Image (spheres, rainbow, N blue to C red):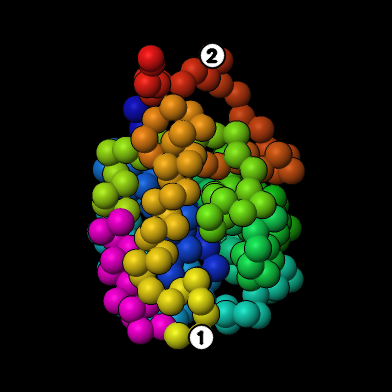
């Protein structure tokens, strides 16, 4: 089977959003030999974010947006179009459009727009147009206001995800935002969410995703897709 390129585009690097929201899945994809790229749209704390991604087996890239100021505007969309065209991903993952964080919501809309425009020849960038096959939305923090129709078993990579998140050394000292008071608290929340999603599909740990139904590019399966993970039978 041909190896995939997976582009996971998040807003922030502190904590690194995509490893935090779907790091178990990203690690699993990387472990299978796929190219997985974790993107932070903001440039803060690049060294730490790179360490997080490296533990997962992923590459890192950074855009030059500002935390708290991400907008779904033409400039942002065209930056993401160029990112998509330069990496030519088989799968794009980004935030849910219903996420609690305004940066996450704006970026989600910008990524959707960029996926649609990346294929359009009239939109000029340094790289050639490219049609993104699949766009998925990741879990929100703690699953708040989140929808899901795809569950990925991360039992084999959950500990790798936790190890990666522990590279956020600066979060031991971060103050002023209660839920970011410590990396331990973040990890506790992430474990609870993964256990809850796993419980929903009768496995130990899972990460949840939803298809971007408002992305007009649809692809066919060779047959009906069928889950390949066993459940805990009584």
Depth check: 51 or 140 in front? 140
Marks 2 & 1, CB-CB < 8 Å contact: no
Residue 84 in which image quadrant: bottom right
- Element at badge 1? loop
Q: Residues within 10 Å of mark 2 (few under 14, many from 20)?
A: few
Position above or below: 47 against 87? below
Q: CA distance from mark 2 to mark 1?
A: 51 Å
How many circles with numbers are drawn on the protein? 2
Residue ID for mark 2: 223
> x%, y% of residue 155?
32, 38
Identify the residue at image location x=54%, y=58%: 141
* In the image, farthest residue toward the front: 234
Give the position of the N terminus as an image quadrant: top left
Residue 128 in which image quadrant: bottom right
Instruction: Give the extent of the magenta segment.
Output: 162-174
> x%, y% of residue 73?
74, 71
Position above or below: 221 against 167? above
> x%, y% of residue 202?
44, 27
Identify the residue at image location x=40%, y=66%: 185
Q: Residues within 10 Å of mark 1 (few under 14, many from 20)?
A: few
The label number, if any, that marks residue 176 in the structure image:
1
Identify the residue at image location x=74%, y=43%: 214
Main secondary structure type of the part rendered in magenta: helix
- Element at badge 2? loop
Residue 164 lies in the magenta-colored region: yes
Asked whether residue 50 appears in the rendered view, the answer is no
């Amino acid at each position: 089977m041909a190896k995939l390129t997976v582009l996971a585009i998040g807003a922030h690097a502190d904590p690194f959003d995509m490893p935090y929201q779907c790091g178990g899945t990203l690690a699993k994809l990387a472990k299978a030999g796929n190219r997985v790229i974790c993107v932070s749209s903001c440039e803060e704390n690049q060294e730490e974010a790179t360490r997080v991604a490296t533990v997962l087996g992923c590459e890192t890239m950074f855009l030059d947006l500002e935390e708290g100021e991400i907008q779904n505007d033409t400039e942002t969309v065209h930056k993401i179009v160029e990112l998509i065209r330069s990496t030519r991903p088989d799968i794009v993952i980004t935030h849910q459009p219903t996420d609690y964080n305004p940066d996450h919501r704006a970026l989600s809309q910008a990524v959707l727009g960029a996926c649609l425009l990346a294929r359009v020849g009239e939109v000029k960038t340094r790289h050639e147009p490219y049609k993104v096959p699949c766009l998925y939305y990741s879990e929100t923090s703690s699953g708040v206001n989140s929808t899901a129709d795809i569950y990925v078993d991360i039992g084999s990579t959950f500990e790798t995800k936790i190890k990666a998140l522990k590279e956020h050394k600066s979060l031991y000292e971060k103050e002023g935002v209660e839920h970011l008071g410590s990396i331990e608290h973040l990890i506790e929340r992430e474990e609870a969410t993964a256990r809850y999603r796993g419980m929903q599909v009768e496995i130990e740990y899972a990460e949840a995703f939803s298809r971007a139904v408002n992305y007009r590019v649809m692809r066919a399966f060779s047959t009906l897709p069928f889950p390949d993970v066993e459940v805990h039978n009584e």
